[in-house]
Amino acid sequence: MAFNFLFKTPKPRQFHYEPLFYDARKEAREERIKKIMREMKISEGEAYKPGITRGSFRDYYKGRKRSDRFSTLRLLIIIIALVLLAYFLIMR
């Protein structure tokens, strides 16, 4: 009995069932919303999609700052190389 902790005993499987309920108020509300949208001639394909999500600005600027830094550094290296190449060609 002292070695029971060495063996992992299997746990029994559990049945998980979430019943679906009919909500008459919700159905009526959704039908009214659809009717109003048809009257206002708003198609369902034009539903509002938020473009701003939590953390989207931070991620955008973090990635942009990194890429701007590397592009600026790359541009400086190219300019210095061209200036040195022009200097050596002119001095010959």
Image: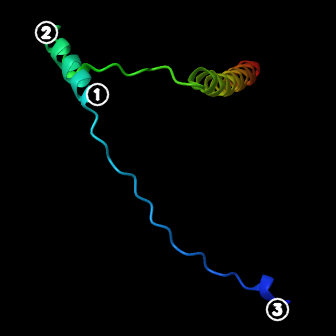
Label 1 residue SS: helix
Label 2 residue SS: helix
What percent of the width, then of the height, locates residue 52?
A: 50, 20
What percent of the width, then of the height, locates residue 20?
A: 32, 47
**Res. 58 in view:** yes
* Vertical order, 9 against 50 (above or below): below
**Residue type of the residue flagged with mark 1:** Lys
- Camera-side residue: 91 or 19? 19
- Say if mark 2 contacts mark 1, CB within 8 Å: no
Q: Residue 39 carries which label?
A: 2
Q: Earlier in the sequence, mark 2 or mark 3?
A: 3
* Vertical order, 5 against 44 (above or below): below
**Residue type of the residue flagged with mark 2:** Glu
Q: Residue 26 carries which label?
A: 1
**Residue type of the residue flagged with mark 3:** Met
What percent of the width, then of the height, locates residue 38?
A: 14, 14
Residue corresponding to mark 3: 1
Q: Which of marks 2 and 1 is in front?
A: 1
Q: Residue 55 carries which label?
A: none
* CA neighbours of label 3 inside 10 A, class few (<14), some (14 to 19), many (20+): few
Query: How far separated are the C-alphas under marks 2 and 3?
Result: 75 Å
Identify which residue is drawn at 22% across, 24% down. Answer: 28
Answer left or right for 49 relative to 69.
Answer: left
- Camera-side residue: 22 or 43? 22
Q: Earlier in the sequence, mark 2 or mark 1?
A: 1
Identify which residue is drawn at 35% across, 51% down. Answer: 19
